[in-house]
Image: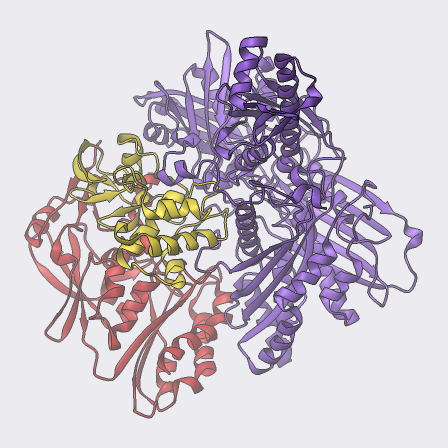
Chain colours: A red, B yellow, C purple
Amino acid sequence: MSVKNYAPKNIEDLFSDLAKMTPKSKIIAGGTDLNISLHAGVVKPDALLYVGGINEMRQIVKTDGKVEIGAAATMSEIAKSRLLQEGLTAIADAAADVGSAQIRNNATIGGSVANASPAGDILVPLFLLKAEAVIANSKGELRRVPIPEVLLGPGKNSLCYDEAVIKFLLPLALPGQRSAFVKLGFRKAVTVARIGLAASLDMTEDGLIKAAEMMVGAISPVPLRIETAEQYMLGKRPDEIVETVGRMLSDLIIEKTPKEFDRDYKIGAACGAVDNLLKRFY
Amino acid sequence: MRLEFIVNDKKRVLEVAADKRLIDILREDLGLMGTKEGCGEGECGACTILLDGKAVHSCLLVAAQMPGRQVTTIEGLEKNGRLDPLQSAFVEEVAIQCGYCTPGMILSAKALLLENPAPTETEIRRALAGNICRCSGYTQIIRAVERAAREGGADI
Amino acid sequence: MEFNMKNLKIVGVSHPIHDAEAKVRGNAIYTGDMQFAGMQYAAMLLSPKPHALIKSIDASEALALDGVETVLHCFNTTERTFSRFQKLSRQPGIMNQERVFNRELRQIGDRVACVVAETPEIARQAVRLIKVEYEELSFTTDVHEVLKGALAGMHPEGVSFEFEREMGDKSLVAQDCVETVTHSIMDRVSHAAMEPHACVAYYNKSMDELTIWSPNQGVFGVRTMIADLFEMQYHKVRVIKTTMGGSFGAKQDWILEPVAACATLATGKPVKVVYSREQVMLNTSCRAPYIADVKSKFTRDGLLQSLDIDVILDAGAYLGNTMAYIKYQSTLVPRTYQYPYARYRGQAVCTNGTTSGGLRGWSSGELCLFVEHNLNIVARRLDIDPLELRLKNVHMPWNKEMANNISLEEIRAKECLELGREKFAWDEKKQSDADFNLKNKRYQRGVGVSCGGHLNGYFPINFDFTGVEIRFTESGSAIVNVAVHDHGCGTVQAFKMIAAETLGLPVDMVWVAEGDSAYNPFDTGCYASRSIYVIGRAVKDCCHKLQEQLLQDMACVLSMPVEDLEIVDAQVRAKNDPSTCFSYTDAVHKILFTLQKEVSAKHQYKNTTNCGVMGTHFAHVEVDTWTGMTKILDYLAVHDIGKAINPEICRAQVQGAVVMGSGIALTETMHTNPKTGKSVSSLKDYHVMNAWEAPQVQVLFIEDGLTEGPYGAKSIGEASLVPVTAAIVGAVNEALQSDFCECPLNPDKIVALMQERMKKECV
């Protein structure tokens, strides 16, 4: 049986095409993960709804108090966006670190969230920066949902088959606030994260940390905050806390990561990841 | 589905399954055998093509994503019987051995030069990081990209 | 030294590979690109079980799918068995253990069935509809378990094979030696040639002729094995070598050829089989995992006295080449260092892991790692610089090796080491690393050096001859007919250059045919680094013969004594009369019309030497002790290449070898999960180095042109991989002051080592 296909050009058409979706249908943007499953015959959809042709789903724009990233924006577009600097750098960092140039040119932020891979680089900064997803449904409605409520676990999201994320909203960072993302993979480039680490720091003029938020991905089904570290950092300089924060991350991994997910390596390498991250702040 | 798109500057209209991979469309329906499959999962880069001017894996795209888009394959680089400066540079710099990675490698380099006509070695290495060459140590390939950037001028 | 090197116009000048222009245009035709009218496509079902018996196969649903031609499996195909390693008719020492489709499946990835259909897509769909009932059998991927008796009966001939030999004279070993024992482990490695395996076959029923096209390293080997398996006469099977997208040894075992042959014999239609990457990794071959113990004896001032080497090789499901492999390895033991005595014991053990085969260097690289690692530890114990220790012990020119008592001729190990020491700034780097390491906590640096080489052809282990035919065309160009198999590394171009140089022609006036068993003179195949050294030499000799023939024929035409004629600049001239002068094309026409003869020559060359081939490699690394990532800061490879026929290709090959060997040292593993028997089978998890992380590699060649090879050339393609892993592992161990040799030394292992150290420090 042949696969139906829909390619709406605007949000209005998207609403009506969503109404044609069945539980077996798939929404496709970059397709960098989905198409492997299609070819392997693991996924056999009755219809493909391609959202990459919807212009407003590809844009990155600044609106009142927020930056909006279209769900079909590619990693390359996110990595290069001038709107994602200073406090929002972490998200550009993560996008720039995804796979190869070919993957970055095709993979989208919406696809990454929909796939919900624990090792998805972009998820960590989305959590850290308190992103919200704007979700469209077949009834023509839009709703805003915080990221932790969209992402439920490995390969699992809370989207219904007739729903699609159309964009992400990121609150603008405070002046002086900076963020960064680093990852440890199997190698230096074109690699899947074994630890994805992001922080958003607010620092005094003499380099002391005033406010801190820190998240880690790839050690558990969804990204986790490292609350002990966030507390500990306050009033200290980033360069003097590397080993202690490293130990805190190790402890979190010991607590949260199952052995078969390279726990031993992650425990040992945590300090290196923390060092790489904190170096971005001094 | 009816697929209408541009391949190597020519409009093509095909009847294909919506979930047929672009690489299979190129090779089976259009006979463009220059695009190679090395892994089928976006890890080796052999199947790289240009999609609207950007390097992407043709093994990770399907027909449903293609309507109205512009594809350039290795066969589309030669213009008026003249090799693209990258193609000549790859020959002259001895940047080719088994040749299986070559089309994808050249197209990744092409995408880079379209965006950045004078890349540094580091930029070249990063742009080609998704294209595995098992024969060489990338030295001659990088040199070829540098040469094409230097000598290619308006042809790039 | 001078005779060969002077006045060369083509040899020694860099040229692109012969089909470079086709490759940049994307119109070089690989097997996967071939198309015939009525072509059928085969898709494979591979075993999901590490060890099982097929109880039944129900292919009815697959057969019912529109477009499916047939489904082949163990119940409807030949029960005869073959060896993927068969190269010769009546080849001694091989075991026929595999069927085209096995009933007893001995590894994940063993061939269960194949669908032949009108399109690749239909074939793949149909594969998913085949129902197989398996009876699971106990399995293991642990060689020690097998040696204790597990898997007894998996192969009637036995599941392990042992080979032991002594070399030299034990009584000459000095007393009062320092004995050092080291232990090394190497994990399974994939060739990862970018072109996945493919084969096209067509059986013309009315002619009873089977033709096979595949990227293989030996058309006569494929012909022999296929004809034997399907009980056909050798002249009824024609094998044609196609453009090869890299081999590194992966395409020297015959795996898809029997499948495609079986499919076309069954259907009478042309059939194409193309493997996916996963199928390549699971069903073709890999480099075997190794466990090795080396015991060395050195005098206190660092003179090597004896080596005692014990290795266990995990052959995987089928013995394949492994019995030959360990025997071969033993002959390599005495080719680097000069010492009185060695003992080698190798065991090839079948498991339910992925079947192994030869990979670039054919056991040399593994041996080099085991021995060089031992030397590094010895150097540390004796407080001798690792490079000095090697200088004291490497072979000198014209030494004889003790395995076969043949001369190593102009081996240039010492010169390689000395040149490398200077150009790499070995002593300076050691000093600056010491300072760096004192000041740094997270990053540690170290240098490593290694010596390793390879052979040039089979001599004297196996017979080693080849045949060549060369003819002049009427336009004065030359056609070289020789069973060459270019792996994609430029052999055809090198042969064209050798022939052009010898005949005095421009390179594009020479055409070199590739392997075709119907037309080529017999040859054993392009393995064992024999292509340039043996076959290339035969081409050169044949060119001389062709010129002699031309002179003789022209002497006849002109009624002149042949001694009065000579060939200068592609012209036949009378020595004493400049006006008697014929271009090749004119001479060929004269002979054609006057004598009714084609100018051609035929030559068989038997190789009777195997000179020493040495590479000394120098690596400088920085280990991130916190994340376990190793960065190669600098790398130098020095080789005594004899003569680089096509220098830039030679350099590119060495650089490629360094990147491959660095991967093997640091990142590449087809690790097999002992609980499931499944090996890594995706490039997502198998980390080949990319352009971003590949080191800059400097390459230096010492060229003396003094070998029996053409224009004094020796082997390089395989030899260049041999020392790499050892150099990198040596450098990592130097940086960490550690002594572990478990390849790959990936971040996991380095971090585990650092964690262990921290724990010890705490206690």
**On the picture, is A54 further left or further right than B104?**
left
Q: In this view, does C186 lie above or below C33?
A: below
Residue C294 in which image quadrant: bottom right
Q: Can residue C313 be seen in this view?
A: yes
Q: Can residue C97 be seen in this view?
A: no
**On the picture, is C441 further left or further right than A225?**
right
Q: Which of C620 and C45 is in front in this view?
A: C620
Q: Quadrant of the C terminus of chain C?
A: bottom right
**On the picture, is A111 further left or further right than C162?**
left
Residue ID at (34%, 18%): C37
Q: In this view, does C623 lie above or below C503?
A: below
Residue ID at (43%, 80%): A245
Task: Give the number of callouts.
Answer: 0
Residue ID at (21%, 83%): A175
Q: Where is residue C758 in the image (x, y as percent from the top left)?
A: 59, 76
**On the picture, is C382 further left or further right than A157?**
right
Q: Where is residue C654 in the image (x, y as percent from the top left)?
A: 57, 51
Q: Residue furthest top?
A: C206
Residue ID at (12%, 44%): A20
Q: Where is residue C434 in the image (x, y as percent from the top left)?
A: 63, 78
Q: Where is residue C295 in the image (x, y as percent from the top left)?
A: 79, 57
Q: Is residue B50 above or below residue C51?
A: below
Q: Nearer the viewer, residue C569 or C500?
A: C569
Q: Nearer the viewer, residue C246 or B123?
A: B123
